[in-house]
Amino acid sequence: MYRTLFPRDVFAELDRLQNELQTAFDIYPNIRGGTRGGYPALNVGTTPRTVEIYAFAPGLDPTFIDVQLENGVLTIAGERRRTRHGDDKATVHIGERFDGRFRRVVSLPEDVDPNGVTAQYRNGVLHVTVNRKEAAQPRRITVQ
Amino acid sequence: MSERNQERGQQVANEASLMPPVEVIEDKEGIVLYADLPGVPKDSLNLNVEGDTVTIEGALALDVPEGLEVTHAEVSLPRFRRVFTLSKELNANKIAAELSNGVLTLRIPKADHAQPRRIEVKAG
């Protein structure tokens, strides 16, 4: 009786509800699709000299990550293969992890230098550093 | 194996954390759990087995240059945490763990008495 009144995963249900509400009220979605829950998740930041992009892309073979910069647009693409066992008798109890092909695109500021890009994959995070052009870097102007 | 809801109150009391996506697969030998923990190096991963509870905790360690101003963040908290309850037939003493490229793999074998056995039916 208690089971029916208070299902085990009542909190999981609340979480799900909250996620759905957040998705529903995300009124300005990105033109290239939803960002919430996408793979890989992206964090972007800037310093006066660089633009830093962090793609949270666990479980990849770094040789198959395709990073391209074209006309100020950075594209990160690749494929994550399914880790599941081939055994037919295996039961999947929870399957929340992404598998398949992915592509994420970031528009960079106008002052980036297309020749100054480095990318590093460590602990499942792809870190791309794009240098900004000298001319755009802040300079102190002396008042006469 | 189910998530432990009682822990949630405590979790809120602790520092806020992200819930890593997982995959839980069961075959006849036991359970394999995969958890996505990008940015978590081996030394800041904390696996804890207490009774029938398994806690996965990890702190992010990113290479952040000085003076970074974040303009867009989908990963908004610096740590992951998720708690699971094991069922009786699983052997919590024999859990094997591996962390590679931000993916944690946990292998939890079934206790010997819980291994499947074929029962022969005799013709009467």
Image (cartoon, coloured by chain):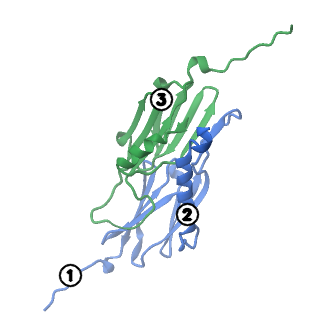
Nearer to us in this view, B117 or A7: A7
**Are the residues flagged by discs 3 and 2 in contact, CB closer than 8 Å?**
no
- The residue singled out by tag 1 in the image is A140
- Mark 2 residue element: helix
Q: Which chain is blue?
A: A
Nearer to us in this view, B37 or A26: A26
In the image as oriented, which residue stretches furthest toward the bottom? A144
Of discs 1 and 3, which sits in the foreground? 3
- The residue singled out by tag 2 in the image is A21
- Mark 3 residue element: loop
Q: Residues within 10 Å of mark 3 (few under 14, many from 20)?
A: some
Q: Quadrant of residue B56?
A: top left
Give the residue at x 34% y 55%.
B63
Q: Which chain is green?
A: B
- Mark 1 residue element: loop
Give the residue at x 39% y 49%.
B12
Marks 1 and 2 sit apart, C-alpha to C-alpha, by 47 Å
